[in-house]
Image (spheres, helix red, strand yellow):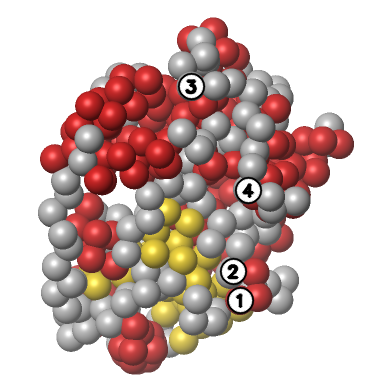
Amino acid sequence: MTDQIITRKRGNLGHITLNRPEALNALTEEMCMAITDALQAWATDAEIGAVLVDGAGDRAFCAGGDVILLHDSGKAGDDRAEQFWRTEYALNELIKTYSKPYIALIDGFVMGGGVGLSVHGRLRVAGDNTLFAMPETGIGYFPDVGGTYFLPRLGTAIGNWLGLTGARLKTADTCAVGVANAYIPTDKHNDLIEALAKAKLDGSDLAVATVMKDFVRRPPVAEPLPNALSCFEKETVPAILKALDADGSDWASKQAANLRKKSPLALAVTLEAMRRGAKLDFRTAMARELDYSLGFLKTQDFYEGIRAQLIDKDRNPKWSHTEGEVTDAQVGRVLGRHAMNELEFLS
């Protein structure tokens, strides 16, 4: 088993730690496979009554996936990207349907692939340093790992805002919008793990809740979301930008400026993907996301965004389209069927 994750049994608790702190615990395919193996083994292990996942170090739960691999695979025309997505998305679905309580301690950065490891689980525990974001449109991509499913279910305006802009939510907002469903101060996380390890966990939510009630606290109070958030209910990206410009508030102006830095193609595809995802069951949404991901491998913006943000780091991407240029046909080509075989699920 890879040393990029640490798995151990602690009493009736199965404990997984993402162990790449120098890379903010970013996911590799090897990690996804190892997590999958542990979850599948523990699902039928009568000694395991709950699973907890956390990240090594004090900076991140998990700040994303192996984007450079995806870039290089697409450039080379091999199947490494597709195999990574197949492994990761199947793991996301396994977490969503896991038969035992699944607890994610989402302290520090939780972005991209880290979102897929947490938001689909039953318990998402924020700490004092939680910082959530889905920043994919900034690299010419879309919020995958189930983002097209869970973001719309936070509410149309909130989901569109987070998915399009990559806005970062700190602890209070993460709890307020429902990304996290419990708050435990960071300095109590180790105590929580020890208490769970000593408890008689029988696979029920009640057994976990009985332990957690002694640690859960009221989260910090979030500032009310601005009225201009309603601009994100518009049906197209140009309409959203027009509404933000018309609003004229500082918040709206900042959102508009942020959107204008993103890939216009990625924004248009993301908005349509979330619209579709709002009507799909989770399995179908994940299967379609595999097609969307493979579709992005055929776009210029995917490679240009990664080049500008992560390779050359000049932060000056040359997008394939300007504002308002993207057509429905171009969006449809990215969102079409690209996978030769359907996504295979594990549960």
Say whether marks 1 and 2 touch (CB < 8 Å): yes
In the picture of the structure, the residue carrying the numbered disc 3 is 323
Position above or below: 336 against 218: above
Confirm whether residue 251 shows in the render. Answer: yes
Q: Please report whichever mark, 4 or 2, sits nearer to the chain's N-terminal start.
A: 2
Q: Which amino acid is tagged 2?
A: Asn
Kindly report which numbered mark, 4 or 2, lies closer to the viewer in this rendering.
4
Bin the neighbour count of mark 4 within 10 Å (Cα to Cα): few under 14, some 14-19, many 20 and up: some
The secondary element bearing badge 2 is classed as loop
Q: Residue at x 30, y 39 (%)?
A: 253
Bin the neighbour count of mark 2 within 10 Å (Cα to Cα): few under 14, some 14-19, many 20 and up: many
- What whole-number distance in Å separates the C-alpha atoms at marks 3 and 4? 18 Å
| Residue nearest the viewer, comparing 318 with 132 | 318
The secondary element bearing badge 1 is classed as helix
Q: Is residue 19 left or right of residue 209?
A: right
Q: Please report whichever mark, 3 or 2, sits nearer to the chain's N-terminal start.
A: 2
Bin the neighbour count of mark 3 within 10 Å (Cα to Cα): few under 14, some 14-19, many 20 and up: some
Q: Which amino acid is tagged 3?
A: Glu
| Residue nearest the viewer, comparing 266 with 334 | 266
Kindly report which numbered mark, 1 or 3, lies closer to the viewer in this rendering.
3
The residue lying furthest to the right in this view is 76
Confirm whether residue 149 shows in the render. Answer: no
- Kindly indicate the quadrant of the structure image that contains residue 20: bottom right
| Residue nearest the viewer, comparing 58 with 147 | 58
- Identify the mark at residue 25; answer none if there is no mark: 2
